[in-house]
Image (spheres, rainbow, N blue to C red):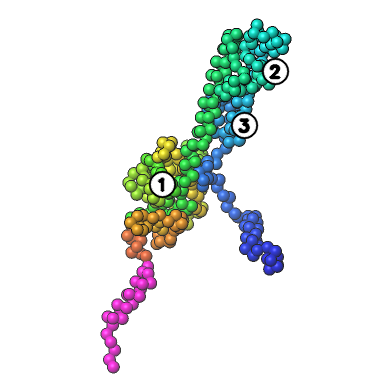
Amino acid sequence: MLSRKGLIPEDYVLTRLAEDVLLQPKLRAKQRKARFVAKNGACNVAHTNIREQGRFLQDVFTTLVDLRWLHTLVIFTMSFLCSWLLFGMVWWLVAFAHGDLDQQRGELGERFVPCVTDIHSFASAFLFSIEVQVTIGFGGRMITEECASAIVILIAQNIVGLVINAIMLGCIFMKTAQARRRAETLIFSKHAVVALRNDKLCFMVRIGDLRKSMIISATVRMQVVRRSTTREGELVPLDQIDIHMDNPVGTNGVFLVSPLIVSHVIDRNSPLYELSAAELPHEDLEVLVVLEGVVETTGITTQARTSYLPEEILWGQRFVPTVSEEDGMYAVDYSKFGNTVKVPTPTCSARQLEEQGGVARYRLADPPRRGQVRRRQQSVRLKTPSSPR
């Protein structure tokens, strides 16, 4: 009613109705498995009840780099302010102990030599502390050779200022040049597929790099995370099982100049060996894909990762080609990066397929297509003798 009057768009109403239907509680709904690794690569693990918090202070630099930007900027600002205030107080105490703040002595002229010239209050001592640490040197205030303690404090403040600059500027640089920023342009296909490749049932994922600067020595690893139980009855909630990769270049190292399809042959050593198309959606597992390499421009090692749940694995589909040759060069169409097409694929598990004699027996048992049936019918008609007139 509201959409017909023009108050609410029709598509918005339909979307809200669909959401309301989906949000209704279902008694037999399957509880969704929590992800171990999110689609963007973030690990879904919360560290709680850590008693030895002092270990983080032993590695202050890494702790500062791991903090959020807001906390880092607050610590960056407070570290300089606190050091300026601390040494400003020290310079004020030096001036107070030497009598530099006494105006009557200042009126005597050349007879009295202060430790630091033109320090009359805490504000002037604070300004002199800033000038010393950041080496501004406006020229109005300067240290004299009257007090040896002032020379020692000057040296100490310079050393402390250099240490603070090195730590905080290094922390800011590391946060801006973190390797995970480079991983933002390393992409994975939204879905994984299971189909035949070279007469073998394979689990396939497409990976790509959006930048022209390459990833050197790129490697791809896959793991299956599932709940398992040992022979002794021990429950392993997150059992990480490595699976063998059958990359296009033959090894784990890939030349990621264009999108590649990395595959895993489902054989006897694969944890997916006994899974069929009907059993896969009900299986409690997660497939992790990790891409590692060295950034060509910075030399920093980066890592990109993602995961696939059973509902994100498409059985009987294949990725469409994305590379074409145009005007003497190869062009990559990233709009087709995650597109798939259906292909004839056995719905049974790899184990059942092997027991039935492999893909060759499956193709023989596969019924002929429509074109083949038509050609057979035409050949039969040609072979039948014509009836007498």
Closer-to-camera residue (334/188): 334
Q: Position of residue 225 (x, y in %)?
A: 48, 43
What kind of residue is marked 2?
Ser
Q: Is residue 376 magenta?
A: yes
Quarter of the rendering occupied by the C terminus: bottom left
Q: Residue at 70% across / 18% down in the picture?
A: 121
Q: Which mark is residue 63?
A: none
Residue that appears at 57% across and 33% down? 67
**Image quadrant containing the N terminus:** bottom right
Magenta region, residue range: 367-389
Q: Earlier in the sequence, mark 2 or mark 3?
A: 3
Q: CA distance from mark 1 to mark 3?
A: 36 Å
Q: Going 51% across and 53% down the picture, which residue do you hit? A: 311
Helix, strand or loop status at disc 2: loop
First in sequence: mark 1 vs mark 3: 3
Residue at 41%, 58% in the rendered image: 320
> Magenta segment: does it hold 294?
no
Q: Say which of 23 and 280 sits in front.
A: 23
* Residue occupied by mark 3: 74
Residue on which the image places disc 2: 121
Q: Position of residue 284 (x, y in %)?
A: 51, 48
Answer yes or no: is residue 307 visible: yes
- Secondary structure under tag 1 reads loop
Q: Amino acid at mark 3?
A: Val
Q: Residues within 10 Å of mark 3 (few under 14, many from 20)?
A: few
Q: Which residue is mark 1?
A: 212
Q: Amino acid at mark 1?
A: Lys
Q: Residue extending furthest top? A: 111
Provide residue 48's location: percent of width, then percent of height. Answer: 59, 34
**84 to the left or right of 197:** right
